[in-house]
Image (cartoon, helix red, strand yellow):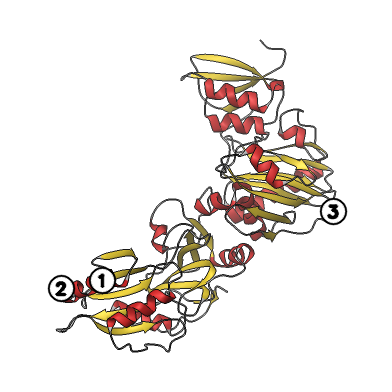
Amino acid sequence: MIHSGTLPQLAPPDFRKDATLDRLAERFNVAQFVSFSPSASGPRQEYCRLAGLPANHRFASPSQAVQALFERSAEGTVNIRTFSEASSQSREFLYALKDSQTVLMALARFASEGSFAIVNETIDVSDGGVSGVILDGVVEFRPDATPRGVEREGFASLPAAWADAAFHAVFGFGPEVVHGEAARLEFSLHPAPRGYRQSHVLYWELGAHETLPGNRVDIRWPNDFSRMMGDKAFGLLIAHLAGFRVPRSTVIGRRLAPFVFGTPTGSKEIWTRTCPVEQVPGKFTTARGWLDPFSLLSREDPEGSTIVSVLAQEAVPAVWSGAAVQGADGMLYVEGTSGTGVDFMQGATPPMALPDAVVATVRATHARLVAAVGDVRFEWAFDGHQVWVMQLHRGASRSVGSIIVPGEASEWAVFDVSEGLEALRLRVQSLPTGHGLLLRGEVGLTSHVADVARKAGAPTRMIRADKA
């Protein structure tokens, strides 16, 4: 688990890159490697960490060392990273070399140039795991990248305790490290065992680092991890990690093995919910009862590029259901209806007057969510005693009163909300630049109808059904 404590002693800053890696391997799992230094006779073996062999096993020749590494590489390829004795910064990097002869020729060249080299097994970073960095109780990570992937947009960021719980929920394991202040640790998680110790977690680099200012983590999505899991599933997982009631959900993903999180509702009924890469309000199936996920995905996402998972979620015996969103005026709009609220969210029925006690409970839930995550909007269900979070999304709304999307337009098109969500999607896509939309009918600011309009971005207002 990721927890506070004392870090293992860091290698002095003047240690070579391969010596530092060897020190890391004394305690942690690392990618299998053999390192070499330059000499008059060519590359000379320095350190070695290969599965099934003693630490720093000495080979008779570089050829034998490289061959032993190839035999243990799950991908059947190796990388070479070069550096100087004076600086650990990489010089030349060769990726996914396929045969020993190519590696040995490269090592001979590097030795003649006075370069040190680390030859390590190639690790598939697109195997369904993630890579990232732990620093001062903050974990940043993403799939389909090395730990350096946190240096570009799209990474996920969580407090260490949340990240640990998320990793164990999704993968069944996580970085089992002792984490202290002012240190930076690079890691990667893999569904299949990898590395010197043949475990699911690899560690790449451990070094001293300045302490981060403050301790507030900016939890935002969509990010690349939420896109792999599905936007809806990720939002619910965040709510669960933050300590809110989320119906027990089984996530069946395209790239992730099935996993479960949430709180049992006491119901014996299941809802089937689709999870697109990013939120597409009201477009894809949410159905009472269990549906064949294979048939559902082939029908709604035949290309396999839009829906990344399906949720089997325990039903909440809802007395009231709805959504809550903070408007541009700073007010929290709590809207809903009796029962499951499906027709309300689809815009088929207007919001009802909610009991004061329900509104107060939803408001209190929203305040706690904001304190834990930041500005959010969410769908909720009230079972007569407590609120359950049914969907969670980051950000407040630009809407206020009858204005769903602020702004002026050169011309206004009228759309009758009784035509439905799919017709609305087509209408907003065909709006000429500079035109706005008047939604005729009564819908909630928190409904999927309003969500679709907000995502489109064109100026949008609601008008009464008797208006032209």
| Residue of label 2 | 113
Of circles 3 and 1, the one toward us is 1
Comparing 151 with 59, the one in front is: 59
Q: Can residue 108 be seen in this view?
A: yes
- Counting from the top left corner in percent of width and height, residue 45 is at 28, 84
Question: From what the image shows, is residue 445 above or below residue 18?
Answer: above
Inspect the image, locate mark 1, and give the three-letter code of the amino acid beneath it: Thr
Q: What residue do we see at 29% from left, 80% from top? A: 63
Q: Quadrant of residue 38?
A: bottom left
Of circles 2 and 3, the one toward us is 2
Residue 82: which numbered mark, if any?
1
Q: What residue do we see at 72% from left, 16% from top? A: 465
Q: How far apart are marks 2 and 3 (CA)?
A: 69 Å
Residue 267: which numbered mark, if any?
3
Inspect the image, locate mark 2, and give the three-letter code of the amino acid beneath it: Glu
Q: Is 277 positioned to the left or the right of 144 in the image?
A: right
Q: Can residue 332 be seen in this view?
A: no
Q: How crowded is mark 2: few (under 14 residues within 10 Å), some or many (20 or more)?
A: few
Earlier-in-chain disc, 3 versus 1: 1
Comparing 127 with 28, the one in front is: 127
Residues under numbered marks 3 and 1 in contact, where contact means CB atoms less than 8 Å apart:
no
Residues under numbered marks 2 and 3 in contact, where contact means CB atoms less than 8 Å apart:
no
- Counting from the top left corner in percent of width and height, residue 159 is at 54, 63
Question: From what the image shows, is residue 460 above or below residue 191?
Answer: above
Question: From what the image shows, is residue 253 above or below residue 113?
Answer: above
Quadrant into which the N terminus falls? bottom right
Q: Distance between the residues labelled 3 and 1?
A: 59 Å
Earlier-in-chain disc, 2 versus 3: 2
Inspect the image, locate mark 3, and give the three-letter code of the amino acid beneath it: Ser
Q: Is 162 positioned to the left or the right of 293 in the image?
A: left
Q: What residue do we see at 47% from left, 85% from top? A: 52
Q: What residue do we see at 62% from left, 68% from top? A: 172
